[in-house]
Image (cartoon, rainbow, N blue to C red):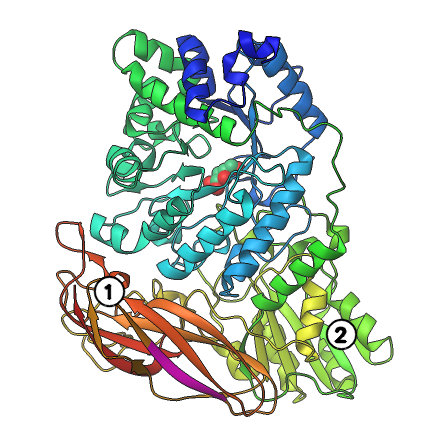
Amino acid sequence: MTADQSARPWLDPDRSTTERVELLLAQMTLAEKVGQTHQVANIHPDDDAAQLAGGQIGSSLFASGATGGNERDEGVLAANIDAAQRHAVEASRLGIPVLFGRDVIHGHRTVCPIPLGLAASFDVGLVEEVAAVAAAEAVVDGVAWTFAPMVDLSEEPRWGRVAESLGETPVLSGRLAAAIVKGFQSDDPSDPDHIAACAKHFAGYGLSAGGRDYDTVSVGENTLRNLHLRPFKAAVDAGVATIMAAFNDVDGTPMHAHRHLLRDVLKGEWGFDGVVVADWNGIGQLVHQGVAADLRAAALLAIEAGVDLDMCSGSYAAHLAELVESGEVDEALVDDAVRRLLTLKFRLGLFDRPYVGEPIRSNAPTDASRATALRAAHAAHVLVSNNGILPLAPGAGTVHLTGPYAEAAEELFGTWTLDGRGEDVVAPATAFRARLGGEQLLVSDGRFSDRSVQQVRNADVTVAVVGEHPWRSGEANSVTDIGLPAGQLEHLRQLSRIGKPLVVVVYTGRPLELGDVLDLADAVLVVWHPGVEAGNALADIVFGDVAPHGRLPMTFPRTTGHIPTSTHQRPTGRLIELHEEGRQGRYLDDQVFPRLPFGYGLTYTSFEYGELRTVGGTELSGAGEVVVEIDVTNTGDRAGREVVQLSFRDPVAQVTRPLVELVDWAFLDLAPGEKGTASFTVRADQFAYFGTDNTSRVDAGEIVLVAGPDALHGSRLSLRVNP
Ligand code: BGC
């Protein structure tokens, strides 16, 4: 044992984490404990030196503002981190290191597709790899903790934050969330190439009224448990280190004061032993929400509810000690929060390696990180219509590339890109030029739509890259109309009027109303915001080196007026099938079917499905399993990947259950003419749900399975469950 370790026995790495935490906690004054619960933004080693040396700052995040997702800043300066850390570790009484966080959401320097685009891949392994690449780059800058994955289920495209989400359905979001947690954290969070993850925003944020960000949420506990809490549970089961509370209320109780959901459900029922962090000034906002008269009352509500770390409101730092001294807050609550925070710091290895030091390597994109970003960008391309124009045949003639994103760089990153650099982006025009040379390519960026329309005649095919600027999506960026941004549809109409083939590529952070575009284009690709490899990925897909295989992770409604719509619609007294027409209560002025259903996506070949069949009976008893299978044949003349989706419906339960819910999926990579079999193992517990008393149950009775290419189509099979 070193001298330091005998004076500070919690520094001895041979002791267990629990022992180290208790040894340290026993030494801490109330003020030092409160210091651990206080997180500040953008720490400055000089300005904050006294507070750091006084043990008054437990954590800092590097962010450019309360809606930082779309604002650029100077980046994280490792030298600043180390200088600040030195004050905390060397000048303070107990030497507790600061925990530094940053929003590393879909790549750090190597920007990959936005989370909704990653979700379109349905590819758990790929998504884990993207998170691991991001973690390895972020640690170079001294980031120890990220605020991702965002797992709010999203069925509200007006809400800008759907871009950050993993889609609308719990099983896909949950599995991808677990993969992201694993990619960021690995199995050993102290591994120097990994960082702590944070599942956010707990809970119900995706239901913000009217799609307005930060708005109120009116949802019952049963719907929360049967849908919205499930991806969080998956993240907790995957070992996520932290959970962030949501800005919204749930049925009148703001989440930062929601004792039942935070303390009883998350920490109690689920046994979550990590840190609950507030969202930015989320505790302070309890005053705006009108449940606390002042910051002191807000701090009281939040610590009682189970918020361990105060992000940027200053309420704990200002009032927690006094609340304990006055007897209003039990010190045990503060101890519990501090225990969790110290445990995280020990688990991350911060006490053993507090400094970043000289950069261990560059974190600029490498061939390997770009290869991951390219595969992720390929997988984010969802082909939603194609009359055969795609892929463009070799010798297809002159290509006219037009639209606001033809030469775009940073715009293709999407929301929440704090550390990517525009110079790392391969723009569509750059990639097309590299492939076609100057002669066969005309580029008009669409700024002059008259010039762009004129060029259509000079080319054999026009590829129009349109869609949303990233600042139209993400935090605080809601819209009342999910049509294309102003002027784009008119431009596309003009381009199509000439009668030459038109391919439309839509970069977007949300589902858009695409009906008219689908009607006028020969092919439409929905690509989300794809990151540094945007152009290369698009060229690979358009020219057929890679076949698109992404699937929509959110339903695309027909119009804004159809929102909300998702696969999780539940049966009403007058509706028995998903989106069934012709029943009372449907819209008078439009069809109710979504324009593009969840799970939809084409590729360059076609598939024929057989009938769903069971191997070994239709009875699911106890913990037993049944294997169900479906044959799929590639009926086209190109190889292709089919994403076979298995959904289910529980026709009779204690509560109304979704008309369609994804339960599993499988990839089949098939050569032309090849027949493959998608095989799924199902267990009764996959059909468990929360009943009228909000406890989990599996009922005896029928479960209808549906296997097909998307949420609306498929072959059915009934199983009998005998729990
Ligand atoms: C967002 C969070 C984010 C935090 C820190 C908040 O405004 O809601 O998602 O992690 O800021 O930047």
Q: Which residue is mark 2?
A: 451
For label 1, the SS is helix
Q: Which residues are magenta?
A: 628-633
Q: Quadrant of residue 145?
A: top right
> Is 591 inside the magenta-drawn segment?
no
In this view, the residue in front, 666 or 506, is 666
Between tags 2 and 1, which lies in front? Answer: 1
Secondary structure mostly seen in magenta is strand
Disc on res. 10: none
Residue type at mark 1 is Ala
Question: Horizontal placement of 705 versus 552: left or right?
Answer: left
Mark toward the start of the polypeptide (2 vs 1):
2
In this view, the residue in front, 123 or 720, is 720
Cβ of mark 1 under 8 Å from ligand 1: the answer is no
Compared with 484, 367 (above or below) is above
Quadrant in which the C terminus is drawn: bottom left
In this view, the residue in front, 588 or 470, is 470
Taking the spot 78% from the left edge, 87% from the top edge, the residue there is: 397
Q: Which residue is mark 1?
A: 684
**C-alpha separation, residue under disc 2 versus residue under disc 1:** 61 Å
Q: Quadrant of residue 271?
A: top left
Q: Position of residue 550 (x, y in %)?
A: 53, 70
Compared with 304, 425 (above or below) is below
Question: Horizontal placement of 4 versus 214: left or right?
Answer: right
Q: Position of residue 314 (x, y in %)?
A: 45, 20
Taking the spot 53% from the left edge, 66% from the top edge, the residue there is: 484
Give the crowd class for mark 2: few <14, some 14-19, many >=20 residues within 10 Å. Answer: few
Q: Position of residue 293 (x, y in %)?
A: 30, 22
Give the crowd class for mark 1: few <14, some 14-19, many >=20 residues within 10 Å. Answer: many
Compared with 474, 246 (above or below) is above
